[in-house]
Amino acid sequence: MAKKSMVERELKRQKLVQRYAAKRAALKAVANNQELSVEERFKANLKLAQMPRNSSATRLHNRCQLTGRPHAYYRKLQLSRIMLRDLASFGQIPGMVKSSW
């Protein structure tokens, strides 16, 4: 089980990313527009730099929904490998059977 503080920190980052997503996209569009003047693009880059760091989507880290484990994460199921195996063993995941030989 991951530390509760790390899971909460990740949730806080997700909320910040959602809150600033539209504003960041607009500023990035202005900053990457080659038709605008250099001064306007530079101002957009400065505004991007002044935004909270945790509002960037690249700061997010995938975590297991049940345990909060950050490693061995399966995106499709949003679970770690350990919880995936446990749930598969108990028949909680449709169509998945634990292999044995």
Image (cartoon, grey):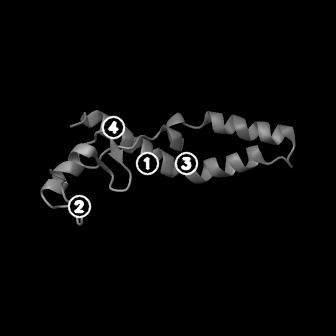
Q: Are dots 1 and 4 in contact, CB under 8 Å?
A: no
Q: Earlier in the sequence, mark 2 or mark 3?
A: 3
Mark linked to residue 39: none
Q: Earlier in the sequence, mark 4 or mark 3?
A: 3
Q: For the residues marked 1 and 2, what is the alpha-carbon distance in whole angstroms?
A: 33 Å
Instruction: In this rendered view, identify the residue nearer to me: 80 or 30.
Output: 80
Instruction: In this rendered view, identify the residue nearer to me: 68 or 41.
Output: 68
Q: Earlier in the sequence, mark 3 or mark 1?
A: 1
What residue does disc 1 label? 15
> Measured along the vertical axis of the image, is residue 87 above or below residue 67?
below
The residue lying at 50 percent from left, 47 percent from top is 17
Mark linked to residue 96: 2
Mark 2: which amino acid?
A: Met
On the image, the x and y values in percent for residue 100 come to: 15, 51
Q: Residues within 10 Å of mark 4 (few under 14, many from 20)?
A: few
On the image, the x and y values in percent for residue 15 come to: 43, 48
Q: For the residues marked 4 and 3, what is the alpha-carbon distance in whole angstroms?
A: 27 Å
> Measured along the vertical axis of the image, is residue 30 above or below residue 90?
above
